[in-house]
Image (tube, rainbow, N blue to C red):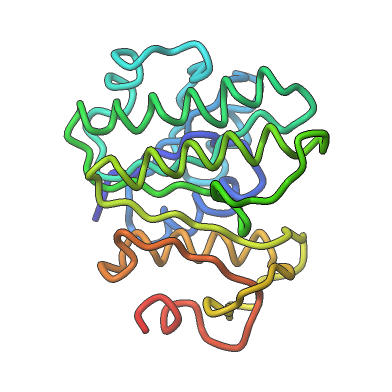
């Protein structure tokens, strides 16, 4: 079993992910910025860790991730503020990747989105553009890091119940439940064939474990 650190532990996906990991026997810690969220995180079976990753430098982040086997980046600024989006979704994410390397934590799972990449096609005047740029930069840095990375890139997120089935061959974004995103992350952590893969997916017809292994 692994020691897993979730960065962005109070996000909707992270709160669904932690119980899956804990139930599988992993030791889970979830990083949150707001101490008022500690009880919510503890209820998932994860150990809450209060830290402001936006302000942490690489050395502080190295101390934060040290001793873990896996880092899951599920943090985000939440949009609305381009400067903070760059600070969190790009700069802090990149520092966390460098920190994982420095700490010898080789397994890193990044939560991204279906259309992420340098060819995201979002116009500069679109409010989504800063996020698209930030994710493209962070994902590229991770791919070049030498870590055992997986980029989880779901389509539009819903609050639907989990289907337990996905389509990893989709070429266009549709939708998928946050619960299924959490299940894909959990499965990817334990699936060697998910290493150095970008998993773009919608809800589909193939069971998650089979889809990742195939």
Horizontal relation, residue 112 to residue 25: left or right: right
Q: Residue at x 33, y 23 (%)?
A: 64
Please tell me whether residue 166 is drawn above or below residue 132 in the rendered image.
below
- Residue 13 drawn at (x, y percent): 61, 50
The N terminus, quarter of image: bottom left
Viewer-side residue, 30 vs 139? 139
Viewer-side residue, 41 vs 213? 213
Horizontal relation, residue 64 to residue 88: left or right: left
- Residue 169 drawn at (x, y percent): 54, 80
Q: Residue furthest bottom?
A: 205
The C terminus, quarter of image: bottom left
Residue 68, quarter of picture: top left
Residue 139, quarter of picture: top left
- Residue 32 drawn at (x, y percent): 55, 26
Q: Residue at x 38, y 55 (%)?
A: 150
Q: Residue at x 66, y 71 (%)?
A: 162
- Residue 11 drawn at (x, y percent): 63, 40
Please tell me whether residue 201 is drawn above or below residue 127 in the rendered image.
below
Q: Residue at x 58, y 80 (%)?
A: 165
The tally of labels here is 0
Horizontal relation, residue 127 to residue 209: left or right: right
Residue 103, quarter of picture: top left
Viewer-side residue, 68 vs 55? 55
């Amino acid at each position: 079993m692994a020691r897993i650190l979730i960065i962005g532990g109070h996000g909707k996906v992270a709160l669904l992910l932690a119980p899956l990991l804990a139930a599988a026997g992993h030791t889970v810690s979830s990083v949150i910025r707001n101490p008022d969220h500690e009880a919510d995180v503890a209820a998932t079976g994860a150990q809450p860790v209060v830290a402001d990753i936006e302000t942490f430098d690489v050395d502080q982040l190295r101390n934060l991730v040290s001793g873990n086997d896996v880092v899951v980046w599920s943090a985000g600024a939440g949009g609305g503020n381009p400067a903070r989006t760059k600070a969190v979704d790009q700069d802090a994410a990149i520092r966390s990747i460098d920190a994982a390397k420095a700490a010898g934590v080789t397994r890193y799972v990044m939560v991204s989105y279906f259309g992420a990449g340098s060819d995201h096609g979002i116009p500069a005047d679109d409010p989504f553009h800063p996020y698209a740029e930030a994710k493209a930069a962070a994902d590229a840095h991770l791919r070049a890091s030498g870590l055992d990375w997986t980029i989880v890139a779901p389509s539009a997120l819903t609050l639907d119940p989990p289907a337990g089935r996905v389509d990893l061959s989709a070429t266009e974004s549709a939708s998928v439940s946050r619960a299924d995103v959490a299940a894909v992350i959990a499965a990817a952590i334990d699936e060697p064939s998910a290493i150095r893969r970008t998993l773009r997916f919608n809800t589909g017809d193939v069971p998650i474990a089979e889809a990742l292994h195939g």
